[in-house]
Amino acid sequence: MRAYEAVIGLEVHVQLATDSKLFCSCHNKFGQQPNTNVCEICLGLPGALPMPNQQAIHYATLVGLATNCHINQSSVFARKNYFYPDLPSGYQISQFDLPLCEHGFLMINVQGQEKKIGITRIHMENDAGKNIHSTTENVSYVDLNRAGTPLVEIVSEPDMRSAEEAVAYLKMLYGIVTYLGVCDGNMEEGSFRCDANVSIRPKGSLTLGTRTELKNVNSFRNVQRAIEVEIARQQDLLDDGDEVIQETRLYDANKNITASMRSKEEAHDYRYFPDPDLLPIEISNETLEKWRQEIPELPRPRMQRFMELTGLPEAEAEILVQNRELADFFETAAKLANPKKVANYILGPMSRIANNNHLDLKPSNWTMSPESLAQLIKIVDKGTISAKIANDIFEDLLTSGETPEAYIESHKLAQISDSSEIEKIVDEIIAKNPKEAADLKGGKTKLVGFFVGQVMRQTKGKANPAVVNDLLKQKLGF
Ligand code: ADP
Ligand code: MG
Ligand code: ZN
């Protein structure tokens, strides 16, 4: 068996979260009755003229700026001609030789190794509709609500060498488009989807092997698995003396295999030409500068800042920045209470509750505010409740939206620090356990734990441990 090296390049389609579609004023909305969200332009009726959506150009440019691309201030829409039932005009409006963005890159980190992944181009295009194949009748339907919705396609260089690197790149990109707010990030609804191009070559070889393209793999986990099984399949072929055929393949997550879908088209099959209905997109220096200023702090620098703030290792700080909402939540709370403790609540109980309920770690899944989390930490620091009680009530606080102060008050959870109240209980317990009391007095100090435990049990954990200790010392003189 020879040693091979995998080569991977990704094409990522990002649905832009604009108000309207790319070339008409239909709403850009998911989940409506089939064929109700359409007009003569997105239906591709003869004579209807497209009008470019400024917000889509704005959003696409932000993606280019955030991925270190050169922005072509004059770029051109081109027709990509092909026939498919979900494409009524017979062509997709895309960009070809003059795309909006080119020559970018992203830095990824895999197992402590920094690596630069090149971005060849980012272009704008409109999406097609959807074919729906009935499972009960021998019939297919077409829903054109999605036709004309705005996409950017982000094409990487073939710079990745493992499934792990591909997923790291993809997650980085996902973080960027959701931080920018240009994509809702909903992968199940297809707002962020990826085609993976995979080839292998003998280790050390400089020429590229024949690639296959895995279509529309719709979760990070499936991207990882699809690439892994495709690499293994190609290795088996080469080891058996067979060839890899350039083709489009589909990943079947249930069987964990890839299967041939169709042979691959070449660019010249599409007969690209500039769309005569649309002028070039021109972006002035002023506009470009203004848009550049809008780029927020992106996940990677933010993660580095959080690492300094909390002393957490990268793997954990990465969790805090995985979506902007969570990073904002952390940051607001960390301004009001100890940042490390805030992080601990998010990485500990909050993650656990999310997992148990199959929810993303997104604060909007619950009602607790960052101010409430900070308040909880301060209440524990003050000793009003113990850390254990704070953990016990955390899920209630998360889902009820009650402030910790109000919750502790209404559930009578505040620690008892009033020594006369605790003294009564201590006396009772000493009276009930005369032998142990005598032993402790006689120097068997490990019995302190027994007495403290009894008091805690009686008070449901609410007695102030310091006060309990003092009282025991006073009474039993150990
Ligand atoms: P197409 O539309 O024909 O798929 P694109 O240029 O849009 O072509 O995308 C090609 C993608 O495939 C890029 O991400 C590129 O990096 C990647 N790629 C090209 N050749 C190979 C190869 N031999 N192995 C792996 N990936 C490749
Ligand atoms: Mg492709
Ligand atoms: Zn329309």
Image: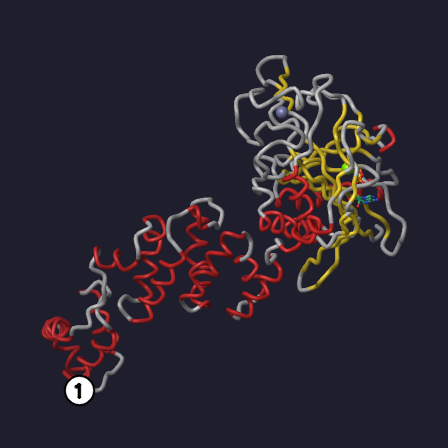
Rendered position, 401 above or below 300: above
Q: Please indicate, yes or no, whether residue 206 appears anywhere in the rendered image.
A: yes
Rendered position, 92 above or below 61: above
Rendered position, 153 above or below 165: above
| Front residue of this view, candidates 272 and 427 | 272
Residue at image position (62%, 17%) is 141
* Helix, strand or loop for disc 1: loop
Quadrant assignment for ligand 1:
top right
Residue at image position (73%, 18%) is 47
Residue 266 left/right relative to 478 = right
Residue at image position (63%, 38%) is 15
Residue 170: percent from left, percent from top? 66, 48
Which three-letter amino acid code belongs to the residue tagged 1?
Gly
Q: Mark 1 highlights which residue?
A: 477
Residue at image position (77%, 27%) is 277
The type of colouring in the image is secondary structure
Residue 158: percent from left, percent from top? 80, 49
